[in-house]
Image: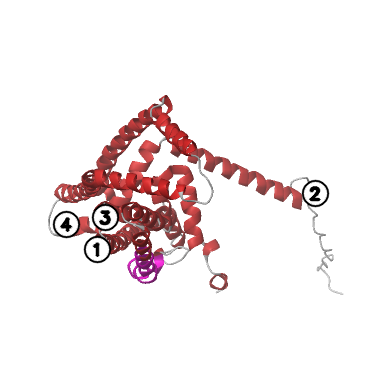
């Protein structure tokens, strides 16, 4: 027996505390919480989309200016390294862009104006041939019904409804001119002070978020620039190939159709189909069915060359999106912004995916976007 030493009483293990069961911590409560969060995010996204649609006249020119500035940023860097100041470099690049856009518009308008009367006469002759062919069908088609359809079309063209549509078209032209001027002005400042503006936008971020914003901005500019330059190269090859084929076949409006092929090539998948349909329709009206079928064959051949050889080389695997993603992006962009939305949908989707791929590091995607075997490693 040891004096002066006390034996500690044995400690009994504390039973685990069972959390109080409430309506919000069971499985149904967790589901309800997640549902409320999803609804809140959906409402916020809807409010953002509605706000952007209300400011379309500002948002679309700014986005177009950002895309063009990203595409021409390497040329700006080359001019600055050659010793030119920021302002002269900006004026040279901006003048080049404006002249290129003006040349595209002038080529389309001049080609249509010079050959419109011939195409109209050929279309009228084709309609008469179709009417003559209809009269040879085994079933009878009433001439009075055909004349009634023609009268209805003529009445619509002279009605107040068509006049209101024409006035709406004048308003659309005014909005287009306003947006074009705004885009040129914003593009000037993006080219001249782009790095300064981006540095100002990064000021609220600190630490890891500042580095993340830097990576996201650099990736966005690189992705937009590479996408636009690659798409422009592919579109130029498509326009040259189809334009040469149309010129050999002596299809009217072939310069305008070639330029239209170049413009529509910026709408993936759908643009090539629309360009082929328009070229085939003009060939069918101006020539005959055989020439139209040859035009369709030329369009298909050029598109196969583009999809299998040009895009993998010029666009690169880093910018390649799955066809399903492209179709969904095109649908959403068309619903929200029409033709301009369809043009902007794919590059913006590519930018979003590019930012996800550098979210946690220069070559480290966001955790949810990593391969699961890479996450375990």
Residue 229 horizontal/vertical position (percent): 30, 60
Question: In terms of sequence position, does the residue under pointer 2 or pointer 3 come before the other?
Answer: 2
Front: mark 2 or 3 = 3
Q: Which residue is mark 1?
A: 248
Q: Are marks 3 and 4 in contact (CB under 8 Å)?
A: no
Residue 258 horizontal/vertical position (percent): 28, 56
The residues bearing labels 4 and 2 have C-alpha atoms spaced at a distance of 68 Å
Q: Which residue is mark 3?
A: 254
**Quadrant of the rendered structure where residue 165 is?**
top left
Q: What secondary structure is the stretch in magenta mostly built from?
A: helix
Front: mark 1 or 2 = 1
Q: Quadrant of the C terminus?
A: bottom right
Query: On screen, 55 above or below 223?
Result: above
Left or right of 289? Residue 51 is: right
Q: Residue at x 84, y 73 (%)?
A: 2
The residues bearing labels 3 and 4 have C-alpha atoms spaced at a distance of 36 Å
- Any magenta on residue 307? yes
Q: Secondary structure under badge 4? A: helix
Label disc, if present, on residue 79 of the rendered structure: 4
The residues bearing labels 1 and 3 have C-alpha atoms spaced at a distance of 10 Å
Q: Which residue is mark 2?
A: 21
Question: In terms of sequence position, does the residue under pointer 1 or pointer 4 come before the other?
Answer: 4
Query: On screen, 144 above or below 211?
Result: above
Q: Are marks 1 and 4 in contact (CB under 8 Å)?
A: no
Label disc, if present, on residue 105 of the rendered structure: none
Question: In terms of sequence position, does the residue under pointer 4 or pointer 2 come before the other?
Answer: 2
């Amino acid at each position: 027996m040891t004096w002066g030493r006390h034996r500690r009483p044995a400690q009994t293990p504390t039973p685990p505390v069972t959390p109080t069961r409430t309506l919000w911590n069971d499985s149904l409560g967790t589901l309800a919480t997640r549902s409320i969060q999803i609804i809140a995010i959906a409402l916020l996204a809807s409010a953002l989309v509605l706000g952007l649609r209300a400011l379309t006249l500002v948002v679309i020119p700014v986005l177009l200016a950002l895309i063009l500035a990203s595409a021409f940023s390497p040329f700006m860097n080359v001019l600055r390294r050659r010793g030119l100041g920021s302002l002269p470099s900006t004026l040279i690049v901006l003048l080049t862009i404006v002249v290129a856009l003006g040349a595209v518009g002038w080529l389309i308008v001049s080609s249509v104006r010079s050959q419109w009367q011939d195409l109209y006469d050929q279309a009228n002759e084709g309609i008469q041939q179709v009417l003559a062919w209809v009269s040879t069908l085994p079933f009878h088609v009433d001439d009075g019904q055909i004349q009634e359809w023609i009268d209805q079309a003529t009445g619509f063209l002279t009605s107040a409804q068509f006049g209101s549509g024409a006035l709406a078209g004048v308003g659309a032209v005014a909005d287009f001119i306003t947006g074009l001027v705004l885009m040129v002005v914003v593009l000037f400042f993006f080219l001249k002070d782009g790095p300064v503006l981006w540095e100002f936008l990064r000021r609220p971020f600190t630490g890891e978020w500042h580095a993340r914003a830097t990576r996201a901005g650099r990736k966005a500019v690189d992705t937009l620039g590479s996408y636009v330059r690659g798409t422009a190269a592919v579109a130029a090859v498509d326009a040259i190939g189809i334009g040469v084929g149309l010129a050999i076949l002596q299809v009217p409006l072939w310069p305008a159709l070639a330029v239209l092929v170049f413009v529509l090539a910026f709408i993936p998948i759908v643009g090539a189909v629309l360009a082929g349909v328009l070229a085939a329709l003009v060939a069918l009206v101006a020539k005959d069915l055989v020439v139209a079928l040859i035009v369709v064959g030329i369009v298909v051949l050029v598109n196969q060359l583009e999809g299998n050889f040009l895009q993998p080389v010029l666009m690169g695997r880093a910018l390649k999106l799955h066809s399903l993603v492209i179709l969904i992006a095109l649908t959403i962009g068309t619903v929200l912004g029409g033709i301009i939305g369809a043009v902007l949908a794919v590059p913006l989707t590519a930018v979003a995916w590019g930012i996800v791929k550098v979210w946690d590091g220069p070559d480290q995607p966001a955790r949810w976007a990593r391969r699961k075997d890479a996450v375990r490693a």
